[in-house]
Amino acid sequence: MAASPDPQSLRTLFAIQHPILQAPMAGASPVELVCAVSEAGGLGGLGAAALPPDTLRAQLRAIRQRSGRPFNVNLFAPASQRIDTAARPGPQAMALIRHYSEALDLEPPATLESPFADPEAQLQVLLDERVPVISFHFGVEAAHVQAIHDAGLLVICSATTVEEAVALDRLGVDAVIAQGSEAGGHRGTFDGDYREALIGTLALVPQVVDAVSVPVIAAGGIMDARGIVACRALGAAGVQLGTAFLGCPEAGIAPVWLEQLKAASPSDTTVTAVMSGKPARGLRNRYINEMEAIDEPLLPYPLQYALSGPIRREAVRRNLPDFPAMWSGQGVAMLEETSAAALMEKLVRESQALLADLAAAPA
C-alpha cells in the first residue's frame, strides 16, 4: 500500500495554496479563467493546442499582466506523430457533411488542414516565456521532458492506464495526471486501444499511486468536495477538475453548450472519436449519432475535426445543439453556475470540513 497522500507535495511543487488544478480545456479555459483559479490559490490551466505561436505568446503575457501566480499550459503531443495530409473522408461521411452544410447555408470544405498549431513551435514559446508548469496530452517525448527540465520548468502528463503512468514516471515527469474514464474531453490514451483504457477514477487512481514515484493528480468525474476527499483517500496528492469549471462565466463557453450541460445527465455523455479522430467524452447530439452509424474509417486526428469545423462554428453561432463538440464529463449533473473564485472557495471550505468530519468519526 502506498503512503498517505501528501497534498503539501503539490503545494510545494507548483507553489500553490490548494492542490486543485483547473483542467486546461481548449476553447473553454481563456485567460480570465486561468487567472481566476490561480488567484484563488489553485493552478489555472490554459488549453493551448489550437493557439498559433504568436497568439499563445500574447495570451501568456496577458496572464502575467493579470496574475503573478503559477499556471499551467497544455499541449497536445507528441510532435513526432505526423498526420496523413492526403487523407480524404469516405463517401458516406462526405454525403453527411454536404447535407449538413446545405442545411446551414454553407459550402462543404474543399480542403482539410489541421486546426492545431505546430507543437514544436508552441513548446518553444512556452520555454521562451518560462511557463512554470507545462502539461501534455496523448503522451510526451523524452526530448521534450529534458528540454523543459533544462529550462528549470515542470512537466506533467495524463495517463489513462497504470502502464502509461509507469512509462511517464520513467521519462521523468514531475507528476502524473490519472485520467479516469469519467473525464470530459479528449482521452489522454497514448499506448494501446482507448477502449481498453476506459478505467474509472476509483479503480485507476490507487493503482497509479502504488505504481509511480511522483505525485498523482486524480481527474475524471470530480465536481465537488466529496470527489476531492475521495481522491485524497485513494492516494492522490491533488485533483484536476474540468467540467466543474464550465459553469463559471470566466470559462466563456457558447450559450448552446452551457444550456445543454445544464440539462444533461451522466447518461447523456459518450466517448467517441467521430468528432476529432481521437476519443473524447462529450454530450451526444445528432452529429455524433449519425457519424457513428457510418461504416467507414475515420479521418486521422485532427483532420476529422477539420471536417466538421465550419458546421460546428455555424451551429454555435445559431445556437443549435445538433452539431457542436460539447465536451463534458460524467459529473455534469452536479454542474453549478458560479464564479471561479466562488467555486474554488467552496471546494476548499467544504473539503476541509469533510476531512475534519471524517477524522472525528469513529473507525
Image (spheres, rainbow, N blue to C red):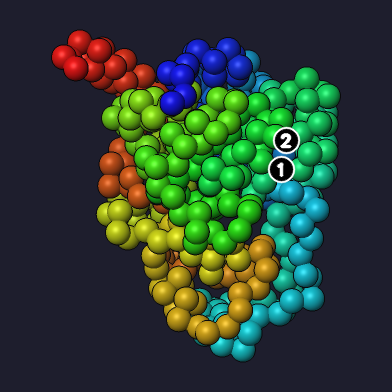
Q: Foreground residue, 247 or 120?
A: 120
308 relative position to 20: left or right: right
Q: CA distance from mark 2 to mark 1?
A: 9 Å
Amino acid type, label 2: Leu
Q: Nearer the viewer, mark 2 or mark 1?
A: 2
Residue 140 bears which disc, if any?
A: 1
Evaluate if marks 2 and 1 touch, with contact meaning CB atoms under 8 Å apart: yes
Left or right of residue 234, residue 17 in this image: right
Looking at the picture, which amino acid does disc 1 mark?
A: Val
| Total residue callouts | 2
Q: Where residue 169 sits in the image (x, y, percent)? A: 65, 33
Residue 147 placed where, x, y %? 83, 31
Q: Which residue bears the numbered disc 2?
A: 171
In the image, residue 181 lies at what x, y percent? 43, 50
Q: Is residue 321 left or right of residue 358?
A: right
Q: Quadrant of the C terminus?
A: top left
> Outermost residue, front direction?
1
